Image: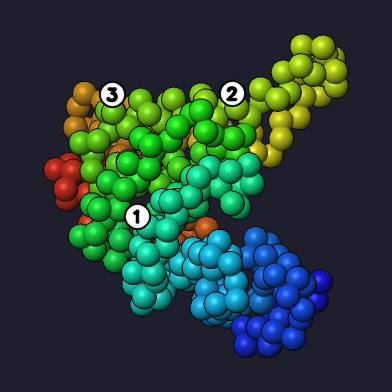
């Protein structure tokens, strides 16, 4: 694959436009799902991803993921104008994503797609101080409640962190939803863990490939990610069970620390400031202690 890291968005798109259909689709998918292969400039990445979204020659999945990736990039570089521009398009994409079934390919799975879009909508609406945050939060709760365990695949395991991040911020928007939502998240975590590793059960029972010492056991990378999910869940569960305002206050801020967009320190700081300015007053609680 050609090196696109030194190109501008226009230069990269020009190269891609000369490729045959099959190679072109493969190149675009590589640039979508492998960030290190994109132009080095984040602003150029944002521009290129938006160009992909506007490319009518791409399938709806690739176009939608392009828009989601562009919105994430806009959040990362704190481009609020771009975020605001993307939101109506993301709403339309979400309506389409709600019609999609769960599938055995992560990039084709309706559940993963829905929460990929909702994650952007929920976080962006808080950063921009929009009243639509309540609608997006409700949509996140509905999407979670509609998960059918009988239709999930082992890829649900891969989606749990994204779901926890999205629902975590949604709960900060609507704290009254903590109780029932925590119970659903517990079911999601248990079921996704069961689905992921049930396929390995015969080998485990027969001791095939099982090391003789714990020091030799190497969990896969997605299990390390799952540890993050469980940490987020425990913060949500504790907040749901908290009895005092002071305890809730501490845990709400812990959830914010865990769940807001944080690809860079600057992005995380901006999101947390938005939480402090937009959401915290609605908690009727004081902000976190900074002593």
Label 2, on which residue? 194
Residue at left offset 28%, top offset 28%: 180
Task: Categorize mark 3 by other alpha carbons within 10 Å: few (<14), some (14-19), many (20+).
Answer: some
Secondary structure category for the residue under label 2 = helix
Residue nearest the viewer, comparing 236 with 4: 4
Residue 247, position as x, y percentages in the image = 26, 30
Residue 33 visible to an observer of this rendering: yes
Q: Quadrant of the N terminus?
A: bottom right
**Distance in Å between CA atoms under marks 2 and 1:** 28 Å
Instruction: First in sequence, mark 2 or 1: give its number.
Output: 1
Horizontally, is 94 left or right of 198 in the view?
left
Horizontally, is 45 left or right of 278 in the view?
right
Tell which tag, 2 or 1, sits nearer the viewer: 2
Residue at left offset 76%, top offset 81%: 19
Label 1, on which residue? 122
**Residue 241 bears which disc, if any?**
3
| Picture quadrant of residue 82 | bottom left
Residue 240, position as x, y percentages in the image = 28, 28
């Amino acid at each position: 694959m050609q090196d696109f890291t030194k190109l501008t968005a226009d230069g990269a798109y020009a190269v891609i436009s000369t490729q045959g259909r099959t190679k072109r689709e493969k190149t675009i998918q590589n640039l979508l799902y492998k960030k290190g292969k994109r132009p080095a400039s984040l602003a150029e990445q944002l521009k290129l991803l938006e160009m992909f979204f506007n490319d009518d020659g791409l399938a709806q999945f690739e176009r939608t993921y392009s828009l989601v990736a562009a919105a994430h990039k806009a959040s990362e570089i704190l481009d609020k104008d771009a975020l605001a521009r993307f939101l109506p398009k993301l709403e339309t994409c979400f309506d389409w994503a709600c019609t999609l079934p769960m599938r055995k390919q992560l990039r084709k799975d309706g559940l993963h797609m829905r929460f990929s879009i909702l994650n952007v909508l929920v976080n962006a609406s808080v950063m921009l101080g929009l009243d639509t945050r309540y609608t997006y939060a409700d949509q996140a709760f509905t999407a979670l409640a509609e998960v059918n365990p009988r239709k999930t695949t082992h890829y649900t395991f891969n989606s749990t962190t994204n779901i926890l991040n999205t629902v975590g911020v949604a709960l900060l928007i609507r704290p009254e939803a903590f109780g029932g939502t925590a119970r659903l998240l517990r079911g999601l975590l248990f079921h996704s863990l069961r689905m992921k590793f049930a396929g390995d059960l015969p080998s485990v029972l027969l001791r095939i490939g099982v090391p003789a010492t714990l020091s030799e056991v190497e969990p896969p990378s997605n299990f390390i990610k799952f540890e993050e999910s469980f940490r987020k869940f425990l913060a949500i569960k504790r907040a749901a069970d908290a009895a005092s305002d002071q305890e809730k206050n501490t845990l709400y801020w812990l959830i914010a620390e865990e769940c807001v967009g944080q690809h860079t320190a600057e992005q995380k700081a901006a999101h947390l400031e938005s939480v402090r300015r937009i959401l915290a007053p609605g908690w009727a609680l004081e902000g976190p202690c900074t002593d």
